[in-house]
Amino acid sequence: MPSARVSRYLGLRLILAVFAVIAFAASLSLPVDAARADDMSFRLVAFGKAMQCQRRCPAVIAAEGEITDRTPYDFLSFVRNNIGRSNVHAVIFLDSPGGKVVAAMQLGRIWRRLGAAAIVGRVDPSAPGSVTQFLSARCLSACVYALVGAKKRVVPLGSVVGVHRMFFYAGGNGPMGEGTTQRRHYDHGGMKSLLAHYTGRMGVSPALISEAERISSDRIHILTRAEITRYHLATARF
């Protein structure tokens, strides 16, 4: 868990004009499979027109990749390494194919403790260096449980959120692990109950977990806008 000093420093300093400089590509084609990705990493992204604000540009956090057992600890280390920067805001742009469920819940709890906002989006690498722009992104499988933890959750039009039944592989590195070719094993109710309690505490409907457990682990169900609203998961605008 983050220290009280870290929590006080970051707080929830939301950028009121956040969408004024974000270009979400609603027509962007996104892969929705849970293929192996790089481990989740974190970096600061200067937000705004660099020529105007220069080194005083507010900075947000880009979180990209697969959630592993180390991800919550990596995030805490990242935060502590950047605690002295007064321009850092507790706003996280999230793009992930999933990963470990327990680690995702741990990460979500940290984000809630910090009062962070999470937006499913990713940095546009082709944007001019003087202006920061963001594109649609994905938050699939276990990623959803990290998203659930954020105090403010945004899934802009064009970004996707997807769920399916939890599983782990025999001989894996932890509960609900993904990424090997061994035989799958499924939860028999204990993890579902834990997730339902967690989502309820975070203000999201536990019915989301029941819906996810109905979906075959061989596919991902992309939540519709109506479902995102019904489960109180996120809004489309900041």
Image: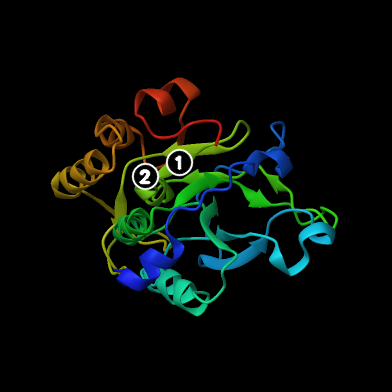
Q: Position of residue 117 (x, y in %)?
A: 47, 48
Q: What colour scheme governs how the chains and residues are painted in the rendered image of this protein?
A: rainbow
Distance Cα–Cα, label 2 vs label 1: 7 Å
Q: Which of marks 2 and 1 is nearer the N terminus?
A: 2
- Mark 1, secondary structure of its residue: strand
Residue 33, visible in the rendered structure = no
Closer mark to the observer between disc 2 and disc 1: 1
Residue 74 as seen in the image, left or right of residue 189? right
Q: Position of residue 94 (x, y in %)?
A: 53, 52
Quadrant of the image containing the N terminus: bottom left
The one of 37 and 8 positioned closer to us in this rendering:
8
Q: Position of residue 170 (x, y in %)?
A: 27, 64
The one of 180 and 95 positioned closer to us in this rendering:
95
The type of residue carrying mark 1 is Arg
Cβ–Cβ under 8 Å for marks 2 and 1: yes
Quadrant of the image containing the C terminus: top right
Residue 142, visible in the rendered structure = yes
Residue bearing mark 1: 153
Q: In which quarter of the image is residue 200?
A: top left
Q: In this view, does 66 lie above or below 137?
A: below
Callout 2: few (<14), some (14-19), or many (20+) C-alpha neighbours within 10 Å? many
Callout 1: few (<14), some (14-19), or many (20+) C-alpha neighbours within 10 Å? many
- Mark 2, secondary structure of its residue: helix
Residue bearing mark 2: 148
Q: Is residue 41 above or below residue 227?
A: below
Give the numbered dot on residue 24: none
Q: Residue at x 76, y 57 (%)?
A: 125
The type of residue carrying mark 2 is Val
Q: Residue at x 40, y 39 (%)?
A: 163
The one of 10 and 68 positioned closer to us in this rendering:
10
